[in-house]
Amino acid sequence: MMSKKLEAALNEQINFEFYSCNAYLAMAAYCASEDLDGFANFFTVQAQEENFHAMKFFHFVNATGNRVLIDKLPAPRNEFTSVVDVFHEAYKHEQEVTKRIYNLADIALQEREHATTSFLKWFIDEQIEEEATFSSIVKKLERIGEDGNALYMLDDELGKRTFVAEDASVLK
Ligand SMILES: [Fe+2]
Ligand SMILES: [Fe+2]
């Protein structure tokens, strides 16, 4: 049986993943309002990924005989000055997520909760990809600068992103 501390920390992460989902939907909405439909698609897919992460935690907490508690979420940031601003915020957000996952992993390790440690490994690996994705787009956007053609080429590329859940059963 895991401690109340670890159970609460996992619940906090479930809620943070749902918050992340909303934060990315707000970014998608901003991009759509700027007629950057590819960027909007990128963030809609990102929001689906975050919902998938939340559900992965949801099923783990249930499967280990613990109780999921859904909390009230703070409003995400809705206003941005540019897509560069959006991606800086998104990259910062993913760095915060990594910190939170590491903190969870520390608690699981301290409590010798090996099942949770094993479960969290997927998220530790996932965060490498998440941070790399955002950091690379930030760099591309900085290089693009005021070049409108290059921006629309990137918009086109990001419009092709689709969501594939590697374990769709957690969404049921
Ligand atoms: Fe996530
Ligand atoms: Fe993420």
Image (cartoon, rainbow, N blue to C red):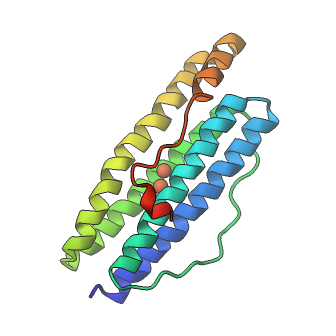
Number of numbered callouts drawn: 0
- Res 42 quadrant in image: top right
What residue do we see at 39% from left, 85% from top? 66
Camera-side residue of 46 and 16: 46
Q: Is residue 137 left or right of residue 43?
A: left
Q: In terms of depth relative to the viewer, which is nearer, 54 or 92?
A: 54
On the rendered structure, is 66 left or right of 140? left
Could you tell me residue 20's position as x and y percent? 57, 57
Q: Is residue 109 visible?
A: no
Q: Position of residue 25 (x, y in %)?
A: 67, 50
Residue at the image position 69 percent from the left and 43 percent from the top: 28
Please say if 155 is above or below 41. above
Q: Is residue 164 above or below residue 109?
A: above
What is the quadrant of residue 88 in the picture?
Answer: top right
Q: Where is residue 165 drawn, in percent x and y?
A: 45, 49
User: In the visual, does 38 lie left or right of 34?
Assistant: left
